[in-house]
Image (spheres, rainbow, N blue to C red):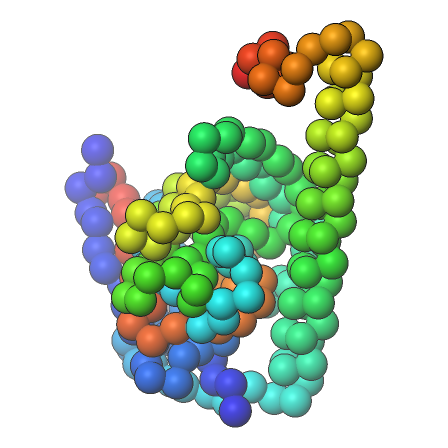
Amino acid sequence: MPTKLLVDCSTGAVEEIELTAEEIAQREADAAAAAQAKADEEAAAAAKQAEKEAIAARLGLSAEELSTLLS
Amino acid sequence: MANTYTAIATVTVGAGGASSIAFSSIPSTYTDLLVKVSARNTDSANNWYLLKLQFNSDTTGSNYSYRLVGGFGSSAYSSSASDRYGGYVTSGARTASTFGNTELYIPNYAGSNNKSFFSDSVTEGNGSSYEILGLWAGLWSSTVVITGITLSNDAGNFAQYSTATLYGIKNS
């Protein structure tokens, strides 16, 4: 069972607490949402890179020349 | 120059790992707070993991925002978002016993303005691939005093020997 650590700064006491079923479900939902957001971001970055390379090709530039211009 | 730099509390994750590390009942007697985190994730599916922040009991992502500049390999990057992230955590896929490091600075945490924070974070994998670093400038849109800070990951758990230390800072 996953646990969380709770540190009471007024006493210094550290408590290890098991997650509730609701907390576990929320963590799983958050992780799925984060994975989807990351996939969406990577897809957008890949699409943007493809668009840049297409423009470079129309201009007769190589990938290296494009990279130099954009750096 | 700070005249007071006090370790308020520290915690080390045990053998079973931990989903989160939470500092509660933070005294309001300091001017600024600093959290130093050394963390590794138990999971290995991702190249790195994001350090997730929570102030007090606020888990609403839209109440948080950040702007990030960083480096990965030979590339620099920048991004911004409304979400609760403020650092990186080394993946469980990296060389054993390597941990990412984050310094999270929160000025005027007990003031009556919205709470800004600054984070300097880097993963560490003993020179293997997928090392990443970032400088985060963030904002928690709340004017209440920060009495609690919770750290977690975007996925997975903190691995054994991950640590977090909360420091209180003031100029007197």
Q: Is residue B77 left or right of residue A51?
A: left
Can residue B145 be seen here? The reply is: no
Residue A5 lies, in percent from the top left, at: 41, 78
State whether residue B168 is above or below residue B134. Answer: below
The front one of B92 and A12 is B92
State whether residue B155 is above or below residue B18. Answer: above
Instruction: Quadrant for residue B154, please give it.
Output: bottom right
State whether residue A47 is above or below residue B86. Answer: above
Can residue B129 be seen here? The reply is: yes
The front one of B156 and B165 is B156
Instruction: Quadrant for residue B99, please give it.
Output: bottom left
Q: Is residue A51 left or right of residue B79?
A: right
Residue B109 lies, in percent from the top left, at: 45, 49
State whether residue B111 is above or below residue A67. Answer: below
The front one of A55 and B48 is A55
Residue at 74 percent of width and 22 percent of height: A52
The front one of A28 and A20 is A28
